[in-house]
């Protein structure tokens, strides 16, 4: 079984508000993107990676890849306007020999190689599989600043990446979404629309997405405390 990894890193990081695009913001002595590249390259079944980048960061991206010392082939491409566009563009560059494609956010530097392995394996069997964690807080529906309802959290999960799918299923899901004008914030939603089964594998609260300055500060502290990456 062969898998290709897509690392989406083309966002600007507006909510983080740094001078550099988010994937290039330093974290523990490396650009954030470094960690996702190292994690996917450590997975035996992953034979190549495709990385989406802001158009002006392609040569910077190449030097980040070089700095990782990984030995799988890595293709770099400018991303699109939205995350979904970036994944669609990257999919065009994925080898037709791959059985499974695993999509991962560069903004999640703490995803373990094992989490990739589990999602790839489950996708190969089920069609699709994503890392997710159960919702642990109580959910409130709010209007203005007042609560209007409490939503039952039973059965609710927070979706993370990696998200792995059989290659042809993910390609079809993106084609259908383009045809139907559907915009989604993750790939699983597009695959769910096709009627295919998408399984859950156990994500981790450490696999959080760096979105705000607080997230970045937490990530820095975790690395300083010796969290393995
Ligand atoms: N991404 C991408 N192409 C886009 C938008 C996002 O490849 N057009 C990537 C980001 O680089 C990130 C991942 O998708 O690794 C998740 O997106 P998000 O956390 O929203 O990152 P940004 O879009 O960069 O952040 P913001 O929304 O705050 O601008
Ligand atoms: Mg975004």
Image (spheres, rainbow, N blue to C red):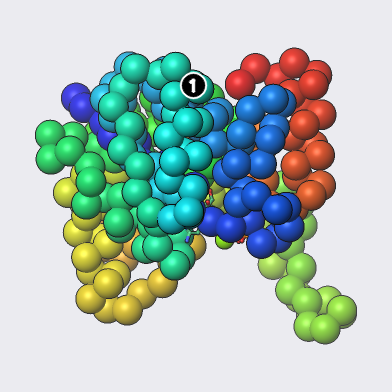
| Image x and y of residue 109, in percent | 59, 34
The residue lying at 69 percent from left, 25 percent from top is 29
Measured along the vertical axis of the image, is residue 172 above or below residue 182? Answer: above
| Residue farthest to the left, as pictured | 97
Q: In this view, does 70 lie to the left or right of 15?
A: left
Q: Quadrant location of the N terminus?
A: top left
User: Is disc 1's CB within 8 Å of ligand 1?
Assistant: no
The residue lying at 26 percent from left, 50 percent from top is 91
54, 182: nearer the viewer: 54
Instruction: Give the quarter of the image for residue 103.
Output: top left
Q: In which quarter of the image is ligand 1?
A: bottom right
The residue lying at 13 percent from left, 40 percent from top is 96
| Image x and y of residue 23, in percent | 58, 44
Measured along the vertical axis of the image, is residue 81 above or below residue 214? Answer: below
Q: In this view, does 225 lie to the left or right of 104?
A: right
Instruction: Give the quarter of the image for residue 173.
Output: bottom left
Q: How crowded is mark 1: few (under 14 residues within 10 Å), some or many (20 or more)?
A: some
| Residue farthest to the bottom, as pictured | 144
Q: Quadrant location of the C terminus?
A: top right
| Residue farthest to the right, as pictured | 145
């Amino acid at each position: 079984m062969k898998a290709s990894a897509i690392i989406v890193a083309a966002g600007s990081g507006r909510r983080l508000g740094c001078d550099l695009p988010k994937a290039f913001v330093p974290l523990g002595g490396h650009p954030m993107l470094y960690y996702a590249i190292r994690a996917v390259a450590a997975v035996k079944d992953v034979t190549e990676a495709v990385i989406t980048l802001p158009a002006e960061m392609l040569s910077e991206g190449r030097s980040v890849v070089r700095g990782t010392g990984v030995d799988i082939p890595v293709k770099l491409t400018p991303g699109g306007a939205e995350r979904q566009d970036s994944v669609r563009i990257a999919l065009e560059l994925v080898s037709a020999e791959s059985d499974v494609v695993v999509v991962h956010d560069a903004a999640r530097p703490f995803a373990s190689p094992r989490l990739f392995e589990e999602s790839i394996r489950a996708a190969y069997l089920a069609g699709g599989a994503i890392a997710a964690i159960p919702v642990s807080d109580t959910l409130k529906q709010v209007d203005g600043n007042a609560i209007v309802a409490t939503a039952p959290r039973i059965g609710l999960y927070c979706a993370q990446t990696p998200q792995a799918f059989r290659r042809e299923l993910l390609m079809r899901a993106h084609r259908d979404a383009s045809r139907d004008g559907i915009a989604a914030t993750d790939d699983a939603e597009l695959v769910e629309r096709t009627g295919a089964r998408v399984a859950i594998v156990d994500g981790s609260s450490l696999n959080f997405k760096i979105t705000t300055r607080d997230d970045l500060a937490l990530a820095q502290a975790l690395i300083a405390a010796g969290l393995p990456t």
